[in-house]
Image (tube, grey):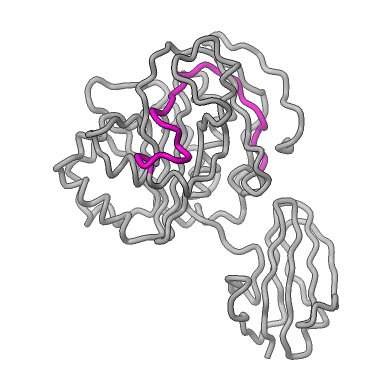
Amino acid sequence: MRSLHCPAVPCILAILGMAFAHAAPVAPNPLSLLKDKRVLVINGDNQPEYHKGPRDILAGKIAKMKDAVGFATLKVAGNVDTMTYATLKNYDVVVFNYFSRVEYCLGKPFEKAFRQWVAAGNKGIVGNHNTGANSKGEWDWFRDSVTSMWYIDHKDQSQPGTIHVTTDPAVAKSPILEGMDARFTGSDEWYSFDMKPWHAAEAPTWKDCRVLYTLDENSVAKLTDKMGANHPVAWTREDALGNRFFYTTLIHSDAGADSDFYHSLILRALEFAAGYRDPVSMGGAPVAGGAGPAFATSSREVQVHAAGAFRLIVRSAKGETLYSFSGRGRMALFPPVLARAGMYSVTLEAVGGSVSRRILIY
């Protein structure tokens, strides 16, 4: 597993025009709640069927992810035009797998059901490639509320290009990018957008998006519509209702869909869509928040869930360091300083960053 900031592994041009680093897919994130989620994959086989090869490959990969992670349930469906909320409410995460012609849902039961499902909150949505190729007048709500972007239908043929991971340090530390490659090269239809996304009124939710990968436009031989240095190809967003959205313009070819990079990206996207449990818990109960009211408990057990090395620090209410322990992975600790009732601060420092929680021991 390579660091985000390590030099990219040399790429080899594949027979179908896809070059990718030969590395195993990332391991599942143990902090993800994905194993407890009910996942619905919508293939959408409206005629004509666009990108059937990549779609079937990814559906197969998601089935393998279920075997590795153990989703609560996995349902793969074709067209869902007639699906009602009574059925949709049984799922926590919806994957639009190369779902073209979303406008077919307009006026159908699924349009109302999906909007009601999103309005319920705490849902996860994953979309890819032509799922988001919405022009004005197709399904504007879906474009603005799910994919967050309004596309130009690509004017150029599929061709090689290189994407790079974000340079934003806060985004780079996100769990969704843990273990992901810093660079990926492959052939794709490089979508552009018909306005600058960072200030356009036509993209009302874009301001809340966090870009994961951008296209190096200089790596593409011919790109009719250019966006400059900020040409996003994968991003996430969370809303006030606790919904988590992931969308990527990737990827067009069978070889790209079958790559370890794409497997890893979609696994991390599913984990993000499912949400994460807090890496620090007391007596098995998550210690939510950090700046809010203290978590009160009589338990002296601190459970740590970390991917790799960590350091746990217990401080007094005044900030004095009372206890420090270094470990790795998942551990249950009983800091002796917590034997006395009082207010404390518990800080977990790990590879992905640090979290601090205030606790009240009684």
- Rendered-image quadrant of the N terminus: top right
Left or right: 64, with 146 as reference point: right
Report the magenta residues as a range. 178-203
Residue 21: image quadrant is: top right
Residue 7: image quadrant is: top right
Figure check: 232 above or below 272:
above
Residue sitting at 16 percent across and 47 percent down? 109
Which of the two residues, 115 or 308, is positioned nearer the viewer here? 115
- Residue 247 image position (x, y, % from top left): 45, 38
Is residue 147 at least partly visible in the picture?
no
Left or right: 160, with 190 as reference point: right
Figure check: 331 above or below 206:
below
Figure check: 329 above or below 256:
below
Residue sitting at 66 percent across and 32 percent down? 181
Q: Is residue 184 magenta?
A: yes
- Rendered-image quadrant of the C terminus: bottom right
- Residue 354 image position (x, y, % from top left): 72, 60
Residue sitting at 67 percent across and 80 percent down? 359
Left or right: 289, with 209 as reference point: right
- Residue 268 image position (x, y, % from top left): 55, 43
Residue 119: image quadrant is: bottom left
- Residue 276 image position (x, y, % from top left): 55, 57
Q: Is residue 91 magenta?
A: no
Which of the two residues, 332 or 203, is positioned nearer the viewer here? 203
